[in-house]
Amino acid sequence: MTQRIGWDQYFMLQAALLSSRSTCKRLSVGAVLVRDRRIIGSGYNGAVSGDEHCIDSECYLRDGHCVRTIHAEMNALLQCAKFGTSTDGAVVYVTDFPCLQCTKSLLQAGITQINYLRNYHNDEYAMELIKLKHVKLQQIKLSADTIDQVNLKQYLDSDN
């Protein structure tokens, strides 16, 4: 490896890796909360601990939404709350643009910047709230070159 990847790509790749733990059949999302270039919380979308997972049974749908799933952003915020870590002034990296409820929660928790990888039903009111709160919004791009730079193949078991 001749060059390190940038901080934004590093944290977005962390969110993407977290999304691989998702238990949702409909969309896999990962989120990382960062302050001072340090991860303070993380989450992926899935069921409440101890409940059935959508991947093991079916989504529990009401009005077209799965009510079993806690969103990745909420799980990251709840992890910070559970362990007493302040989110005031933190930044979030999330694989998909946050829904309205997650946007409101992130803003209320003091998040100052929302970085996302993919657009996903971007809510007009969420956008208004982001502007109202003067929160920086940034779409992070991951390129094939960035993925190649990470070079995870070097960690494969040599017996494979």
Image (cartoon, grey):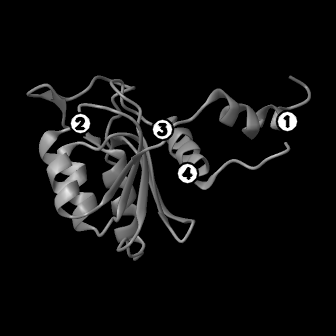
The single residue placed furthest to the left in the displayed view is: 63
Does dot 4 land on a helix, a strand or a loop? helix
What is the spatial separation of the Cα atoms under label 3 and label 4, in whole angstroms?
17 Å
Q: Amino acid at mark 4?
A: Asp
Sequence-wise, the earlier of marks 2 and 1 is 2
Residue 107 position, x and y percent, is: 24, 62
Sequence-wise, the earlier of marks 3 and 4 is 4
Does dot 1 land on a helix, a strand or a loop? helix
* Count of residue discs: 4
**Rendered residue at 34%/33% (across/down):** 119
Does dot 2 land on a helix, a strand or a loop? loop
Q: Which residue is mark 2?
A: 122
Sequence-wise, the earlier of marks 1 and 3 is 3
Q: Are marks 3 and 4 in contact (CB under 8 Å)?
A: no
What is the spatial separation of the Cα atoms under label 3 and label 2, in whole angstroms?
19 Å
Q: Which residue is mark 3?
A: 19
Q: Amino acid at mark 1?
A: Gln
Of marks 3 and 2, the one in the foreground: 2
Q: Residues within 10 Å of mark 2 (few under 14, many from 20)?
A: some
Sequence-wise, the earlier of marks 4 and 1 is 4
Q: Which residue is mark 4?
A: 8
What is the spatial separation of the Cα atoms under label 1 and label 3, in whole angstroms?
22 Å
Of marks 4 and 1, the one in the foreground: 4
What is the spatial separation of the Cα atoms under label 4 and label 2, in whole angstroms?
21 Å
